[in-house]
Image: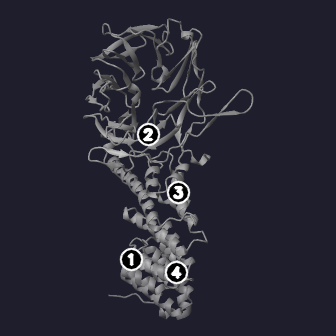
Amino acid sequence: MGEEDYYLELCERPVQFEKANPVNCVFFDEANKQVFAVRSGGATGVVVKGPDDRNPISFRMDDKGEVKCIKFSLENKILAVQRTSKTVDFCNFIPDNSQLEYTQECKTKNANILGFCWTSSTEIVFITDQGIEFYQVLPEKRSLKLLKSHSLNVNWYMYCPESAVILLSTTVLENVLQPFHFRAGTMSKLPKFEIELPAAPKSTKPSLSERDIAMATVYGQLYVLFLRHHSRASNSTGAEVVLYHLPREGACKKMHILKLNRTGKFALNVVDNLVVVHHQDTETSVIFDIKLRGEFDGSVTFHHPVLPARSIQPYQIPIAGNGFRRGVCAAVLPRGCVLTMIFGSYLWNLQVKLEPIVNLLPDKGRLMDFLLQRKECKMVILSVCSQMLSESDRASLPVIATVFDKLNHEYKKYLDAEQSYAMAVEAGQSRSSPLLKRPVRTQAVLDQSDVYTHVLSAFVEKKEMPHKFVIAVLMEYIRSLNQFQIAVQHYLHELVIKTLVQHNLFYMLHQFLQYHVLSDSKPLACLLLSLESFYPPAHQLSLDMLKRLSTANDEIVEVLLSKHQVLAALRFIRGIGGHDNISARKFLDAAKQTEDNMLFYTIFRFFEQRNQRLRGSPSFTPGEHCEEHVAFFKQIFGDQALMRPTTF
């Protein structure tokens, strides 16, 4: 299998730790993504490593028995160690605080602690077989304060640190799950729900295994993932993953079913909002995207793998001496970490490679739906756009139109969110509503400059491409922008015009302008003016466009004067009622440059009459700086030709 076929890979820098053995115990903390290597109960050292830690944390602690669980609080301020089923020991890692250990026993009599979870830097939850106890840790007092507790029989528990939700398994079948949410010193009990167990033979008693449950945040929503090994449907024996949506308020609801179409041992990850299912027998993985359209039966949406099953790209790890050793994954931890036990121990982050997916997903519309939801998608999407406009992989116009529409749909959503935010700020809502946040521009937002710079500008330069196809693609992008009511930038219109001129398609240019296919703008009008030598009607087309732009009157006058059409400029300025404020010198300069004495006489007489009407005298004031033109008038026509003041 070529490297271009692998769409899953391990991160470049794994966390390496000493492998587990009779002397060294290894623990993984999901909340902080830290690996603890505890030697001899801590007496000969504890080493803590995380994916972002440049310097591992090392310390020693007294060997007070076998360590069952060890975790730092958020921000690594307090260490919690469970050695017995009744108590948890604490040690401060805060400067100027005592580092002597202090202990908290669970409050419920005869209860056994199954584990604990830090929900903040100073708040911790004990999970026992008889309920949960929520504590605040007071490091300066070296004690804990019980905030709240809840009693119920617990088989096992699961914690999702991203959403601060603990899931407790209850009842004999273990399939009734009770969630609790924690936030800023409060514990909220959410509605419990039941996981539907698959049908089992009468000889066996069904139950829900902790191994088959995971919690993960997908597209900002919390889901409980249940790996159901045998479908209830009689015509299918393949396993499936059932996604239950767990909202902050309201009941948990079964929403999605991921069809695996195979049986055996599986492991789950969620990476970049994709559910990744690893099949251990074949050492291959598949990915599911619940945002992509599936088969909806009225209550649940069924999804199939987005892509064919592939192995995770083999990795290389250094070995003693020189060289590397290749290996594949051995075991998987939930929620984005792959753990392998080859040559010591390594903790990896699983990553999705987007480039290989481009060739594995031929449907461009579905490919675009998939890519637009990924974090690092921008350059890959631009590459897909360039590829579909290449000679070898040229897509049809309907497909190109679909891709442009999907891009501009995301673009429009962002523009609308930006506008709403700006209006709210202007109205002063940002002060009254602290939840108001500026929209985040993700990589899925490709604006006109992105498409122009990376795709269209290079596309129009391809000599081998039929010019009709080039123009059709440009117009399709402009059509899509207009459909989403996005103002088209003038440089896109300029690209169309230059392409038309390059191929002498002036009739088409005339039609595009006549029927307003190309939007009016000052830069576009100036470009048309520059085309006059190639296409004389472009001059009039430019003037017409400037007239339609009611704010372009000054530009129209300048254009007409530069073409020595002085009378036309004067008529235009009189037509809009601006002739009382125009500069006499500018018009007289232009009239003199035509070397037409009668035209100069007409323009000079117009301004004399204007002066008489406005000031009661035909003479020019010193501020108008027209002395040169008065002298020229006298030289050509004589003093007697000057207009005399009118007396009443």
Foreground: disc 2 or disc 3? 2
CB within 8 Å, label 4 to label 2: no
- Of callouts 4 and 1, which one flags the residue occurring earlier in the amino acid sequence? 4
Q: Amino acid at mark 1?
A: Gly
Residue that numbered label 2 is attached to: 262
Q: Secondary structure at mark 2?
A: loop
Foreground: disc 1 or disc 3? 3
CB within 8 Å, label 4 to label 1: no
- Of callouts 2 and 3, which one flags the residue occurring earlier in the amino acid sequence? 2
Q: Residue furthest right?
A: 321
Viewer-nearest residue: 147 or 157: 157
| Quadrant in which the C terminus is drawn | bottom left
- Of callouts 1 and 3, which one flags the residue occurring earlier in the amino acid sequence? 3
Q: Amino acid at mark 3?
A: Val
Residue that numbered label 3 is attached to: 384
Q: Amino acid at mark 4?
A: Leu
Instruction: Name the residue located 30 percent from the left edge and 43 percent from the top edge.
Output: 300
Mark 2 burial class by Cα count in 10 Å: few <14, some 14-19, many 20+: some
Q: In the image, residue 95 lies at what x, y percent?
A: 51, 15
- Of callouts 2 and 1, which one flags the residue occurring earlier in the amino acid sequence? 2
Residue that numbered label 4 is attached to: 505
Q: Secondary structure at mark 4?
A: loop
Residue that numbered label 1 is attached to: 578
Q: In the image, residue 4 lies at what x, y percent?
A: 59, 48
